Image: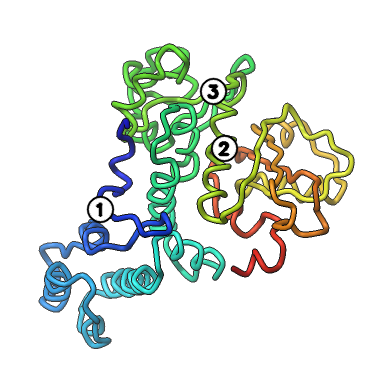
């Protein structure tokens, strides 16, 4: 089996009998190693003592005065957030259960960074054994913001953080000009010929994805959505890419991001979209459930449509939690 996404922290966890990931001391230690929590040179003695004690015992109970004694207000806030997040992890039966509770509970102040890290880890588990680089590259959308470029039928997505980190200097090719000023040797569009190179660079996020004119890329995102829903909701679904949304009797949709939700709501209200809004829709999928007993009767056997759109500044930030709270599950399933 080929390894991928070591940066997810998958190697720091253990599988539970149910197939989820157990919260280990090693996983908590990885969070404690984040720069926001490692005390800087000027940190007070109380903060240094707290950090050191948790490195020795990541699960120990922290008394309220230990936080109050920290001199720096920002540091106190960071520790309050981290310890609340740690508590949610430790009280859940698995990483997946903790994520579901957070999402269904309205996130409750959980930093977006922590949430995307959980998604990265959960997807690494859900896709364990996957040998298709198109599925894995498409799945990066779940936890890595993308920059979009439209060119001759291609909808090219490149990792936003990678592009921003390398901006500066003259562009080296038309592709670099479109996506950002990145070294051409580190930015390839995933295709059948170079797909084998994904494995050695899966943690570098340096392959662009053609979501417009590449059928394997669109199918890859469909398979990633299926795996995410199956793993977290225990529901078998079939997801298929569509050229456009033409169904006059659509019952339900899920916006895969904020812009997709906004555009979907406008269509639901019967509003006409201008050309700019239509251009921002970069992918449409249909989703159907294998077991209709799992579906809200108002939807039944009708497909659920999934809309993915880019923002006006041509970025995509997929919100996987929308699938958890937005799919039309039957009442007993949604509450599980």
Residue with the mark numbered 1: 12
Mark 3 crowd level (few <14, some 14–19, many ≥20, 10 Å Cα) = many
Position of 334 with respect to 172 (left or right) is right
Q: Nearer the viewer, residue 65 or 14?
A: 14
Q: Nearer the viewer, residue 229 or 157?
A: 229
The residue mark sitting in front, 2 or 3, is 3
Label whose residue precedes the other's in the sequence (1 or 2):
1
The mark found on residue 313 in the picture is 2
Q: Under tag 2, what secondary structure? A: loop
Query: What residue is drawn where x is 53% and y is 24%?
Result: 156
Question: Taking 250 as reference, is 55 above or below it?
Answer: below
The location of residue 61, given as percent across then percent down, is 24, 81
The mark found on residue 210 in the picture is 3
The location of residue 237, given as percent across then percent down, is 64, 44
For the residues marked 2 and 3, what is the alpha-carbon distance in whole angstroms?
18 Å
Q: Which image quarter is the N terminus in?
A: top left
User: In which image quadrant can residue 307 be found?
Assistant: top right
Q: Which image quarter is the C terminus in?
A: bottom right
The mark found on residue 292 in the picture is none
The residue mark sitting in front, 1 or 2, is 1
């Amino acid at each position: 089996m080929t390894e991928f996404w070591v940066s997810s922290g998958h190697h720091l966890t253990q599988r539970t009998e149910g197939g989820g990931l157990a919260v280990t001391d090693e996983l908590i230690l990885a969070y404690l190693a984040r720069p926001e929590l490692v005390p800087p040179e000027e940190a007070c003695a109380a903060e240094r003592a707290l950090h050191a004690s948790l490195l020795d015992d990541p699960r120990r109970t922290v008394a309220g005065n230990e936080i109050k004694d920290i001199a720096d207000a920002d540091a106190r806030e960071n520790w309050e957030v981290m310890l609340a997040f740690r508590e949610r992890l430790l009280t859940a039966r698995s990483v997946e259960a903790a994520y579901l509770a957070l999402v269904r509970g309205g996130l409750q102040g959980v930093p977006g960074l922590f949430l995307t890290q959980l998604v990265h880890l959960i997807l690494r588990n859900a896709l364990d054994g996957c040998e298709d680089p198109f599925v894995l590259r498409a799945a990066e959308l779940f936890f890595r913001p993308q920059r979009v470029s439209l060119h001759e039928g291609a909808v090219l997505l490149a990792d936003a953080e990678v592009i921003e980190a390398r901006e500066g200097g003259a562009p080296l090719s038309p592709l670099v000009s479109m996506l950002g000023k990145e070294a051409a040797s580190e930015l390839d569009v995933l295709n059948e010929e170079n797909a084998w190179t994904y494995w050695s660079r899966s943690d570098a996020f340096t392959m662009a994805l053609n979501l417009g004119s590449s059928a394997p890329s669109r199918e890859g995102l469909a398979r990633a959505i299926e795996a995410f829903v199956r793993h977290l909701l225990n529901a078998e679904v079939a997801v298929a890419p569509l050229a456009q949304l033409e169904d006059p009797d659509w019952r339900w949709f899920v916006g895969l991001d904020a812009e997709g939700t906004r555009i979907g709501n406008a269509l639901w209200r019967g509003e006409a979209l201008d050309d700019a809004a239509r251009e921002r829709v970069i992918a449409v999928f249909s989703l159907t459930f294998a077991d209709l007993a799992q579906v809200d009767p108002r939807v039944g056997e009708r497909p659920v449509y999934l809309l993915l759109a880019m923002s006006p500044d041509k970025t995509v930030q997929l919100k996987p939690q929308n699938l958890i709270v937005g799919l039309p599950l039957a009442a007993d399933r949604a509450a599980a």
